Amino acid sequence: MKQKIIALSIAMTLSGSLLVGCQSPQQTVTPVQATATQSALFEQFSTQFIDALWQQYPTWALYSGNHINDGKLVIPNAKNRQQQLQFADSQLALLAQFDQSQLSPSQKIDAKLIENLLTSGKWQIETFKSWQWQPSQYNVASGFAQIINGSYASLEERLTAVLERLTSVAKYYQAARQNIENPTLEHTQLALMQNQGALSVFSDQLISKAQDSNLNDQQKVLFASLVLEARQAVMSHVDWLTKLEAKLTQDGGRSFRIGSELYEQKFTFDIQSDLSAKELYHKALAEKQQVLSEMAKLADTLWPKYFAGQDKPTNQQQLIATVINKLSAKHVKREDFVTHIRAQIPELEAFVNDNKLISLDKDKPLIVRETPKYMQGFAGASISAPGPYDKKANTYYNVTPLDNMSDEQAESYLREYNHWVLQVLNIHEAVPGHYTQLVYSNMAPSLIKSLFGNGAMVEGWAVYSERMMLEEGYGDFEPELWLMYYKWNLRVITNTILDYSIHVNNLSKAQGLSLMMDGAFQQKAEAEGKWRRATLSQVQLTSYYSGFRDIYDFRTEYKATQGDDYSVREFHDKFLSYGSAPVKYIRELMLNK
């Protein structure tokens, strides 16, 4: 799963200063102007919009590689939320003045992306109000770590930005506590764990880094003092969260389930699909049966190899489960989990290059690392990618080590991410999945499409890349790999069923675990982790299946239009060149519709 630094939900929590001056096209833009004039004016508006956005959301700018306001840590209070609403209204008013029929196809899509971004932001503040009931939205560590670990400027310049941000940490957490009202227990527990991890950022090592730098003596003294103050502010917030968790455990809190109406609304903003959430849910139910049928055929083929002379189960589910259980015993040692992943990346790159599947950029580094502690607790593997302003910066493949698991938990986890599934995971997260797609996204000519990425396209591409690699011969069509791929793909489908069922159909934990373990052959550790994730997020788990189906179906359509001229690398390079726009819009551009 890509770290959601491009998602608006993060941007709304990392809110910024009041907009200063964005020129309005009000006096010059009219519906009767020539297309060239409208296009030129829209380009001007887009540039001004992005500049104004970074003034409003400086930490989001930082994540995107724009470092003009790195020192600003915005206080997430009522005043700032009002500024966000004013910003959205003013920009929507400017956007409404364009005659979109006079814009180029690419600009029309940019306009739709900007509109969705702004209206979604308003909905987040006024309707969804997660700033009240999700304490996990409040954590300063990631922004600080982004600056400290960066290489975009001198150490002294970056430490100066850190110094400025440090002055606001206590006020930030004070505002957070004032915002939190009737929270969920689950989001409170996540906030507690991740803010405990945040303490690792404000360490003695950070103070030593400043002491050994070329900051002047006065700055060094102030830096050490402010780091200690920030550490105390985080510790005080952790203490407050600890008491809040105890109270919620005893008295109960808000349900993490958001219900049908909010779910459909969030799905519309987040996924940007032609389907409703309910329609996608029913589509997933149907495809689940098709995948199970393919898995049964493969299990039947593999039975003599692994169970020679033994009676084969007549029940389809039992047959599949028995073969999967046998294969799952082949996995790496727990202490080798991270290093094994690191070693596999060059193999994937070689396969993509040798088979001319996608044009890879050798100059964009990928670094496999252990997931930083302040990021742990949500996903076992993720990608942290630089933004389009910082294209040459490192992309990190975050892998959470199994150090904190018991032997039983680690064995369950490793059986889930066995010899074959671990390969599929690396395709998904790294090559040619998230890492590759996000490198392309940063190179897109439209900054709007790069910055305001659609989660369904991003996750859908990673899922699509798994199927594509196997279809192109990765693994030599080994039936074991294909069975495990289908198991993994069944998990993607089940993600949609699970997420919708939890938030809309009030699925219980016992039912959810059964859906994943009995219905989709998942190990208990994976099922428990996915249940937790589904209680901490909404809709996001549907993005994998939604995007995958849209991309795969579009490729079939596109291939038919190209006939003998179809090239898999040409399709991939062209598809990825449009940044992280919703698939339905990329389809419009590639088919000239």
Image (cartoon, grey):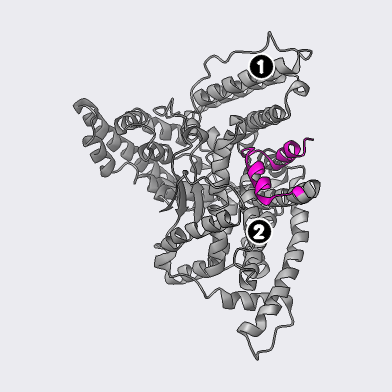
Spatial CA distance of label 1 from label 2 is 42 Å
Q: Judging from the image, what secondary structure is the residue with disc 1 in?
A: helix
Most distant residue in the top direction: 27
| Residue depicted at x 38% and y 44% | 198
Q: Which residue is mark 1?
A: 41
Looking at the picture, tell me which residue is in the foreground, 343 or 201.
343
Res. 441 image quadrant: top right
In the rendered structure, which amino acid carries the disc numbered 2?
Arg
Q: Quadrant of residue 507?
A: bottom right
Q: Is residue 527 left or right of residue 206?
A: right
Dot 2 lies on which element? helix
Tag of residue 531: none
Question: 305 or 233, which lies in front?
Answer: 305
Label disc, if present, on residue 467 of the rendered structure: 2
Mark found first going from the N terminus, 1 or 2:
1
Residue 120 can be seen, yes or no: yes
Q: Which residues are magenta?
A: 565-593
How many residues crowd around disc 1 within 10 Å: few (fewer than 14), some, or many (20 or more)? Answer: some
Using residue 228 as the reference point, say whether residue 105 is left or right of it: right
| Amino acid marked by disc 1 | Leu
Residue 247 seen anywhere in this rendered image of the structure:
no
Residue 205, horizontal then vertical, whole percent: 26, 44
Is residue 1 placed above or below 286 in the rendered structure?
A: above
Considering every residue shown, the one lying at the far bottom of the view is: 309
Secondary structure of the magenta portion, mostly?
A: helix
Quarter of image, res 270 = top right
